[in-house]
Amino acid sequence: SAVISQKPSRDICQRGTSLTIQCQVDSQVTMMFWYRQQPGQSLTLIATANQGSEATYESGFVIDKFPISRPNLTFSTLTVSNMSPEDSSIYLCSVQQGGTVTIYEQYFGPGTRLTVT
Amino acid sequence: GNSVTQMEGPVTLSEEAFLTINCTYTATGYPSLFWYVQYPGEGLQLLLKATKADDKGSNKGFEATYRKETTSFHLEKGSVQVSDSAVYFCALTAPPSGGSYIPTFGRGTSLIVHP
């Protein structure tokens, strides 16, 4: 199983500023995922980040608002740009591992709790 | 497309009560099914999984059986503890449309266990 750490664990930011969230994995992985979890809600996939290529964004999320870097197979960053109170959420980094096709387990970081005032 | 439907919470139980959290799914092909648990202030952790029909996943006293005929994967535990209080997510991964096994998650069901 993969062990994932995220920094910062929480932050309180002013509207109009940006925050970069770091995700570090203890093993090399091909695909890394960024999710948003709003209070009392399920997970919403923001984007998938593969090393060496541009991130793939889900409907409703754009690169200008959520730029992602993936410089190597163990690290990724997500930036939340020009923040507004609606961006207040938990942001989760996740990776996928599995021994055989179709049995892909997701492993999650502890999350970054962002509050925008 | 793929979808997962869970019963709405919160589910509130007394310690040692029997737990069922319903989960049904819609998927193309033959999905793998998962339950994840999120304890307060933490990320999600894999609780159990099943990869084919009639498989039973189990862990920490929790069980779920992959029922293809009813497209269900209900989570059960015979005797819950206060420490089981958490949010439980049902999820699936299915053969890729577009080339990747991105999981589909349910909305989550909050479980509150009172002493």
Image (cartoon, coloured by chain):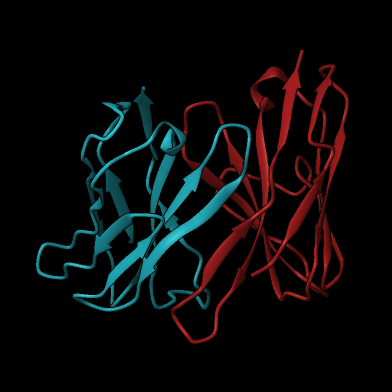
Tell which of A69 and A8 is nearer to you: A8
The extreme bottom residue here reads A100
x and y, in percent, of residue B10 in the image: 33, 26
x and y, in percent, of residue B24 in the image: 22, 54
- Say whether residue B114 is left or right of residue A76: left
Q: Name the residue located 40 percent from the left edge and 62 percent from the top edge.
A: B48
Tell which of B46 and A102 is nearer to you: B46
Tell which of A106 and A59 is nearer to you: A106
Q: Name the residue located 66 percent from the left edge and 46 percent from the top edge.
A: A92
Chain B tint as drawn: cyan
Tell which of B27 and B9 is nearer to you: B9
Placement of B17 over or under B101, stated as above or below: above
Placement of A29 over or under A11, stated as above or below: below
- Say whether residue A91 is left or right of residue B75: right
Placement of A3 over or under B30, stated as above or below: above
Q: Name the residue located 55 percent from the left edge and 48 percent from the top edge.
A: B44
x and y, in percent, of residue A71 in the image: 90, 67
Total count of labels = 0
Q: Name the residue located 19 percent from the left edge and 75 percent from the top edge.
A: B54
Chain A tint as drawn: red
Quadrant location, the N terminus of chain A = bottom right
The extreme top residue here reads A117
Quadrant location, the C terminus of chain A = top right
**Rendering quarter of residue B8:** top left
